């Protein structure tokens, strides 16, 4: 097993013992890329905990603290209305401060937000004020963490690993959701303690990023810091200082250097958006996120306990959320590994079809229960099975792929702003679906609402089948050429 040594101010793995030089170099190169990829995605674990927090805490808040249905909907959705602010900030910060410093900065509002929730007073209205403020700040942090990790990994990872590593942000979010579900299951009546424990994760992310993460060579080249870019590339790809960069690595830096001369003003950037390699991926990815949100994926994440209880299942709602979280994480990890072999389109099509069938099965059960054809609880396995299958199939593609692909499909000239705008709109879609969920449920009933989600899943599947490009095995330049029509 490799040890660790300090090089250029970072703790980095030293060569493994017992391997031939070529094998050791290859293993060390892969290991180093895995380490920086994992560290870069740590902030997304906290984002996942923000997403899943309301699912395990709202029942306790409504019972012990007499939080109303309207107040509960604000607690659930406030983080998503604040998230676009973080997304827009990220686009600017990525270009101005760099990838590494941005990845540390995104944790600051998360720490403050979780502390506010953990220390919320027991008397109204201050309880709600602190929880609302905490949810807003953690929402900003979620938005700020949405794209930096994917952008960083897409810029530093070898082409053979990039398809897998860009999905790690989704793995981090799934892990965060599972962790907060587990903590909520262990402490179902103490939502303040759940928030306090969560505070530790953004702190750990800052420490790990500070010690283990070099700056992106692509960003350094864009700032004319060529020697630092070469040093960073050596660290990330484990190239000894007395060895010249390989032709492929030097070519990556040369491509980034060639683009340095294309630094644009905002006017030039807006003009560049008229080109097909800019507007086509923007349209495709925003459509992908639209169907992701309006097919109910985040609604299930944010209201998991309530949804399980309302289906009439006899399974404990908190335990069901843990099982859902485990299923989601296991599927995300499996897809991350499989993405090296499976194309994006195949995963997307399989996911869309599975989502449509499973959410339709749940809608059918709820319709039959509403009409009195079956009594709630008579077939308790039916809604739970449908819900778990929906979670699994959505994770295969519609939940994970949009977040993975935003770091791949946008041209380097607009990658930072485009990622920020796209994730901003994604969370605006999320806010709309989450805030309207109680009203739509009251107006249409659960059966009508999940029938609507079925229709949106079917429409999204058809749209992505027609529009989504294949990016597996392609370099970033080749992806640009695809949208350019070359």
Image (spheres, rainbow, N blue to C red):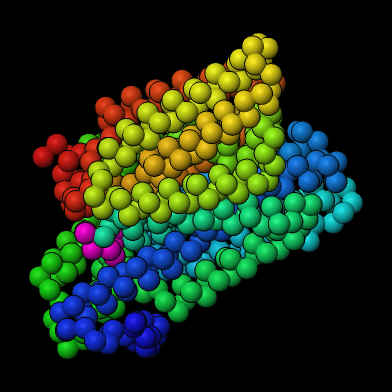
Q: Horizontally, is 133 left or right of 364 in the view?
A: right
Residue 159 lies in magenta, yes or no? yes
Question: What residue is shown at x 75% (from left), y 51% (from top)?
Answer: 188
Q: Horizontally, is 431 left or right of 189 in the view?
A: left
> In the rendered view of the protein, which quadrant contains the N terminus?
bottom left
In this view, the residue in front, 55 or 381, is: 381
Residue 346 lies in magenta, yes or no? no
Q: Is residue 366 visible?
A: yes
In this view, the residue in front, 5 or 372, is: 372
User: What is the magenta range?
Assistant: 154-160
Task: Please provide percent x and percent y for residue 171.
Answer: 44, 54
192 over 217 or under it: above or below: above
Farthest residue in the right direction? 123
Question: What residue is shown at x 55% (from left), y 25% (from top)?
Answer: 362
426 over 143 or under it: above or below: above
In this view, the residue in front, 453 or 402, is: 453
Task: Please provide percent x and percent y for residue 85.
Answer: 54, 48
Q: Horizontally, is 271 left or right of 81 in the view?
A: left
Q: Is residue 97 visible?
A: no
């Amino acid at each position: 097993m490799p040890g660790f040594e300090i090089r250029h101010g970072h703790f980095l793995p030293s060569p493994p013992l017992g391997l031939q030089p070529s094998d050791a170099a290859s293993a060390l190169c892969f290991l180093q890329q895995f380490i920086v990829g994992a560290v870069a995605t740590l902030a997304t674990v906290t984002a996942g905990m923000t997403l899943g927090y309301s699912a395990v805490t709202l029942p306790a808040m409504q019972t012990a603290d007499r939080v109303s249905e309207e107040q509960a909907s604000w607690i659930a959705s406030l983080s998503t209305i604040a998230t676009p602010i973080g997304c827009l900030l990220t686009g600017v910060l990525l270009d101005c401060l760099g990838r590494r410093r941005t990845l540390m900065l995104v944790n600051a509002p998360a720490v403050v937000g979780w502390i506010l929730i953990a220390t919320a007073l027991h008397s109204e209205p201050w309880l709600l004020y602190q929880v609302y403020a905490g949810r807003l700040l953690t929402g900003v942090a979620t938005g700020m963490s949405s794209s930096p990790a994917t952008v960083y990994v897409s810029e530093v990872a070898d082409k053979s690993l990039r398809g897998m590593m860009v999905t790690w942000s989704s793995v981090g979010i799934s892990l965060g959701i599972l962790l907060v579900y587990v903590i909520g299951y262990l402490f179902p009546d103490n939502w303040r303690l759940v928030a306090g424990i969560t505070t530790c994760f953004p702190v750990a992310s800052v420490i790990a990023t500070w010690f283990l993460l070099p700056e992106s060579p692509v960003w350094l080249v864009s700032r004319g810091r060529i020697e630092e870019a070469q040093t960073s590339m050596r660290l990330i790809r484990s190239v000894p200082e007395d060895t010249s960069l390989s032709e492929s690595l030097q070519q990556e830096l040369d491509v980034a250097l060639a683009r340095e001369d294309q630094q644009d003003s905002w006017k030039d950037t807006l003009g560049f958006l008229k080109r097909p390699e800019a507007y086509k991926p923007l349209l495709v990815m925003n459509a992908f996120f639209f169907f992701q949100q309006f097919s109910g994926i985040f609604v299930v994440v944010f209201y998991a306990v309530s949804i399980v209880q309302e289906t009439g299942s006899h399974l404990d709602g908190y335990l069901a959320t843990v099982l859902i979280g485990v299923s989601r994480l296991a599927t995300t990890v499996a897809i991350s590994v499989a993405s090296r072999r499976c194309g994006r389109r195949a995963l997307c099509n399989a996911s869309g079809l599975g989502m449509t069938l499973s959410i339709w099965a749940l809608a059918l059960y709820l319709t039959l229960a509403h009409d009195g054809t079956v009594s709630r609880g008579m077939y308790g396995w039916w809604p739970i099975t449908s819900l778990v299958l929906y979670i699994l199939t959505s994770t295969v593609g519609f939940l994970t792929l949009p977040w993975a692909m935003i770091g791949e499909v946008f041209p380097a000239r607009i990658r930072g702003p485009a990622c920020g705008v796209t994730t901003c709109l994604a969370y605006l879609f999320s806010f709309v679906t989450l805030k309207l969920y109680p009203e739509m449920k009251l107006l249409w009933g659960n059966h009508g609402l999940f029938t609507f989600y079925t229709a949106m899943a079917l429409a999204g599947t058809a749209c992505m089948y027609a529009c989504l490009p294949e990016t597996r095995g392609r370099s970033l330049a080749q992806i640009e050429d695809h949208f350019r029509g070359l």
